Amino acid sequence: MRKQDLVRVHDHLWEIPQSFRRDMRVPARVYTNERMLEQVVSDRSLDQLVNVATLPGIQRYAIAMPDVHEGYGFPIGGVAAVDAREGVISPGGIGYDINCGVRVLRSQQHHDDVKPVLRKLARALAHAIPSGIGRGGATTLRRDELDRVLRDGAKRAVELGFGVPEDLNHIESQGRIAPNDPKYISDDAKERGRDQLGTIGSGNHFVEIDVVDQILDAEAASGLGISEGQIVVQIHTGSRGLGHQVATDWIRSMMKAMPKYGISIPDRELACAPIESDEGQKYLQAMAAAANFAFANRQIITAAARRAWSETLGSSAQLGILYDVAHNVAKFEEYGGRLMLVHRKGATRAFPGQPVLIPGSMGTASYLLMGEEGAMRDTFGSSCHGAGRIMSRSAAKKQINGHELRERLEKMGIVAEAGSVKGLVEEAPEAYKDVDAVVSVVAKAGIAKKVARFTPIAVVKG
Amino acid sequence: MIEAIAHTADVRFRISASSLDNLFSEGLRALTGFMNPYWLRASASVEIEIEARDRTSLLIDFLNEALTKSHVRREAYDTIEFHSLEETSLRATLHGAAAESFEEDVKAVTYHEAELVQQDGVWSTMLVLDI
């Protein structure tokens, strides 16, 4: 893809016309700015977006958010809405980490309250919330118990003692997606995830302590219980091995089914089936159950964070949930009187008034946004999901010294508790786009407004 | 031969070999090598059987099956003993050892960019791992 293949719509939106490739069913649109566009065209993000524009039943545009980067099948930061009756569902448009998402917890503490015990607090969180890579977490369920988690998500976690019913009011879809059915999840998937509840995994997943360093919309921030100097905790993880296996199983199944439905796609990873087909319906229920596993996972991690918090700061120290968003999922939503299935792969739902949680990298800011009407008009109620990578992991390892990075973070007042130096280096701030610029694009495009900015003071990584 | 090629978010390898069965072995070597298991002494083996739509899917499905078995059984595999290898099916025993854990958490071997080709007697394909 070359820059000249794109047509500028306005300062923050470019379009790849439908005429760019004969198999495109709709144009492709990318929200970015002039400077970031140079980065966007430097990898295969937009070629992947053009492939998405070929999906049967896709409506209006294949959309890339400003944090877009190369993925597989869909680009990360991709949105595709397909007609619910005539369209397809593509598990690759949700990704292997079904319902990867972000949860933000509000504390009653301010920066000065935690400064003296910050390292102890970070260690307590790292101890309470294992990465679970290759080894299980603290919560291993029997098969029948696991099925109840798959059916009821965060609600079941609360029933098991991981939180209080009020928590569910602050989670997208109240922490449960239906219809779902655990019988469409394979034994392998259940086995792979059985002992992974309460674990964050590796890669870009983390738990982070942040300070609210800027209030950007006083009224909205106040409504969400956020004030300057307040400490918040971010949790970024998903459905772990269970979700990975569900995606693997169903992509394989749809690959085999496509000839039956006469579907041809330019990238195998976009394997899909009609939404109303047997495969489509079963995958939807499996995806919902895996998404529920992820909601339960973040709920159980929240309980562990609460324990660490009160053990370190005293029993009166509480953590409440600000909000929890999924950024790898497909949902039925209505636009223009038409029911659509919106695939969000590294994109966050941004309905007007809804909190939108945008984690940055470990050394830069994160943002609390709020969805605006422009999202409903232009992006199928979707916003960006993070800063977006610009540097490969191998390049990061070549260019960044782990010990220097740790020292740099310390000088910035950020405590890093990482399972490995390599994991830290791969997620270094310079491996990511400028989150301020990414968020400014969605704000200026009228997709979501800025409410508050968070700055990290402790990072826990797998 | 395994060649690492940059990918913005995930991991990309180009693998090549002089025969189809060696290409499968290189794929397994790339996957297990990247996962970097903490090997235990106890040897392990598992039988697998795959049917796929075509040769490319057969390789990706095979590698995903090896990945699944690794996670579910807490084992890692570095050798394939083929009982049959056809265009769209295979039967094999994977050999390796128990693994205490893995340094890298590979989510899946994707079909993205995978295309088995034979040119001048060399089989090759791209592999993109989601991590």
Image (cartoon, rainbow, N blue to C red):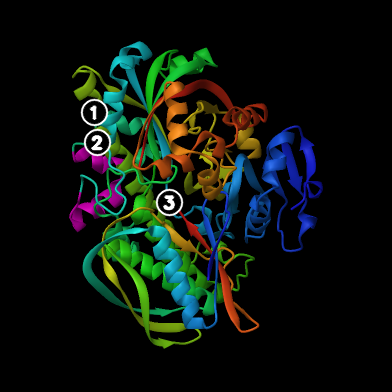
Residue under the image location 24 percent in, 43 percent down: A156
**Residue placed under numbered mark 2 in the picture:** A127
Q: Is A313 drawn above or below residue B13 in the view shown?
A: above
How far is disc 3 from disc 1 in space, using C-alphas? Answer: 26 Å
How far is disc 1 from disc 2 in space, using C-alphas? Answer: 8 Å
**Residue placed under numbered mark 3 in the picture:** A97
Of residues A216 and A71, the one nearer the viewer is A71
The type of residue carrying mark 1 is: Ala
Residue A282 appears in view = no
Name the chain under label 3. Answer: A
Disc 3 packing (10 Å; few <14; some 14–19; many ≥20)? many
Residue under the image location 55 percent in, 39 percent down: A431
Query: Which of the marked residues, 3 or 1, is nearer the chain's N terminus?
Result: 3
Residues at badges 1 and 2 in contact (C-beta under 8 Å)?
Answer: yes
Query: Which of the marked residues, 3 or 2, is nearer the chain's N terminus?
Result: 3
| Residue A149 belongs to the span the image colors magenta | yes
User: Can you give x and y, in whole percent of width and height, for residue A449 in the image?
Assistant: 58, 25
The residue range painted magenta reads A140-160
